[in-house]
Image: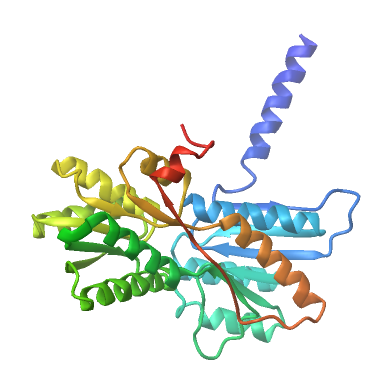
Amino acid sequence: MKIRFLTLLACALACLTGCDKPADSSSSAPSSDTKSKGTIGVSLLTLDNPFFKVIGDSIAAEARKHGYETIVVSGDKDPAKQGNQVKDFIVKKVSAIVLSPCDSKAIVPVIQEANAAGIPVFTVDIPCNEPGVKIVTQVATDNYAGGKEAAQAMIEALGEAGGKVAVLAFKQAESCILRVKGFREVIDAHNASGKAKIEIVAELESGGAKDVGFKAAEDALQAHADLRGIFAINDPAALGARAATEKAGKTQIVIVGFDGQPEGKQAIKDGKIFADPIQFPDKMGVQIVDAIIRHSKGETLPPQMLIPTSLYKKADALKDPELK
C-alpha cells in the first residue's frame, strides 16, 4: 500500500510539473555545475511550424553548451503578443534578444525599447530592416537566391510547354517576400529569353500554413482551370496546395515548395511535390548563438549572415536515410 501511495504521489507531482509551462514556450539552463553567463530571450514567428521549432531547439542546445540560459517563446504570428514578449525580456534584463518578427514594421517600437535598455537585438530567418532600429546582425537563409532556385525547378518541371503558375505568398514575413521576388525575377528573365512562356496568373496569401494554403490553391484552381504549376513559399503551404490538387483531381499540377521539412521531403519522395530549396534551421540556431558570443566579446559583425539553400529533388529524397 505504501508503494502504491508513493507511486500515485510521484504521478501527481509529474502532472503538476507538466502544467508549469505553456506549450508555446520553453526554457533551458546550463548544467548545475556551470555558472550561467546570462539569459537569451528568443521570440519566434511560431512554434507550430517545425522549421521554427528546430531553430528554437538549436538555439537552446547551443546556448547551453556555452553557459547561457534561454527563454524560447512563440509569437504565434501575432505582432502584439510578440511585442509583449520582448517587453518581458527587457524587464527580465536578458543578455540578448533573438527575434523572428511576426511583422517587421510593427516590431520597431519594442526593438527601440530594447536598444534604449542596452540589450543587443539579433534577428533570425525574418529580418527587420526598418529605419530607427539597431539590429546587431541577421542570420538567415539566402531567401532571394532560394526563390531563384525554386523558379529554376519550376522551369525544368514545366518544360517546353510552359504554362500558367500561381504563387502562394506570405506577405507578413520579409523572408517570404524575398523568395517570391527571386522567383519572379528568374521567371521574368526566362520569358524575356523567348523560351516557353511561364505566366504568373495569381499571387495569393497562404499564411505560411497548410489550411490557408489549401484554400488559396483551391481559389487558384477555380479561377484558372488550365493552371500547370504552383510555387508555395514554405512546405506547409505546399502541402496544402497538394491537398487541393488532389481534391480537384489535378495531381499533374507541378508544386514547388520551400523549406525541406521532413513532411515536405517525404512528399518529394512520393512524387507529390517536385522540389524544395531546403533550409538549414539547425545551422541558423548555432550561428545566432555564435554571433551573440562574438558580439559580447566586442567583435564587429556583418549586418547579415546568409546561409545558402540547396535544391532537393526526388533523386535526393530516394537517397535520404531519414525518409520512409
- The outermost residue toward the right is 33
Q: Residue 16 location in percent, x, y?
A: 66, 36
Q: Nearer the viewer, residue 87 or 156?
A: 156
Q: Residue 100 location in percent, x, y?
A: 53, 67
Q: Nearer the viewer, residue 168 or 255?
A: 255
Residue 79 appearing in the image: yes
Examine the rendered structure and indicate whether residue 42 appears above or below residue 90: above
Quarter of the image holding residue 116?
Answer: bottom right
- The outermost residue toward the top is 1
Q: Is residue 284 left or right of residue 259?
A: right
Examine the rendered structure and indicate whether residue 228 appears above or below residue 38: above
Quarter of the image holding residue 289?
Answer: bottom right
Q: Residue at point 69% right, 80% down?
A: 301
Residue 95 appearing in the image: no
Examine the rendered structure and indicate whether residue 1 appears above or below residue 190: above
Q: Residue at point 82% right, 77% down?
A: 297
Q: Residue 262 location in percent, x, y?
A: 47, 43
Q: Residue 114 location in percent, x, y?
A: 64, 80
Q: Residue at point 47% right, 77% down?
A: 104
